[in-house]
Amino acid sequence: MKKRLGLLLGLVLVAGLVGVAACPSVGLPVAKVDAIGGGNYIVWVQNTTTCDVTTIKVFLMVPTTTFQVLPFGPAATATGAGSVWTIQIAAPGLKPGGLMLLGLKGVSPVVPGTCEALVKYLFVSPPCLE
């Protein structure tokens, strides 16, 4: 009984994260944005494709001085500057349904803690065609 309750609670949490994911309109969805203050944000991204994702191209609405990646799985690195970044995730990649946190520091100008204000696109490269 406890196992079923735990599973149900987990499914409700994941469904809640996916349910709010309407931004950006193209590419991987942002499940949640946490404004930390002073131009710092945590952006929750979910892999809604059917593929293991190893490369993500990130286009932000505003530039950031520091961009950090924390996948729930394999190690990842980010390269880029300003408002254009590339995330490389070690094999086997971010699994379908997997979550990844993006830490944005030094966003200037400071904007509201919403996906629409921070994220323009999150493209999987190469595209998932499965």
Image (spheres, grey):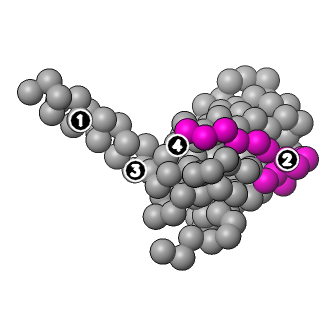
For the point 76% across and 42% down, the residue is 77
Q: Residue furthest front?
A: 91
List the residue tagged with mark 2. Answer: 79
For the point 79% across and 23% down, the residue is 38
Image coordinates of residue 5 in percent, x first then y, are 17, 30
- Indicate which disc, 2 or 4, sits on the residue closer to the N terminus: 2
- Indicate which disc, 1 or 3, sits on the residue closer to the N terminus: 1
- Indicate which disc, 4 or 3, sits on the residue closer to the N terminus: 3
Query: Callout 3: helix, strand or loop?
Result: helix
Amino acid type of the residue that numbered disc 1 sits on in the rendered structure:
Leu
Image coordinates of residue 126 in percent, x first then y, are 67, 70
Viewed as shown, does residue 20 lie left or right of 128?
left
Read off the magenta span.
73-86
For the point 61% across and 40% down, the residue is 74
Above or below 117: residue 7:
above
User: Do residues under tags 4 and 3 come within 8 Å of each other at their CB atoms?
Assistant: no
Query: Callout 1: helix, strand or loop?
Result: helix
Q: Residue 99 shows which numbered tag?
A: 4
List the residue tagged with mark 3. Answer: 19
User: Do residues under tags 2 and 3 come within 8 Å of each other at their CB atoms?
Assistant: no
Amino acid type of the residue that numbered disc 3 sits on in the rendered structure:
Gly
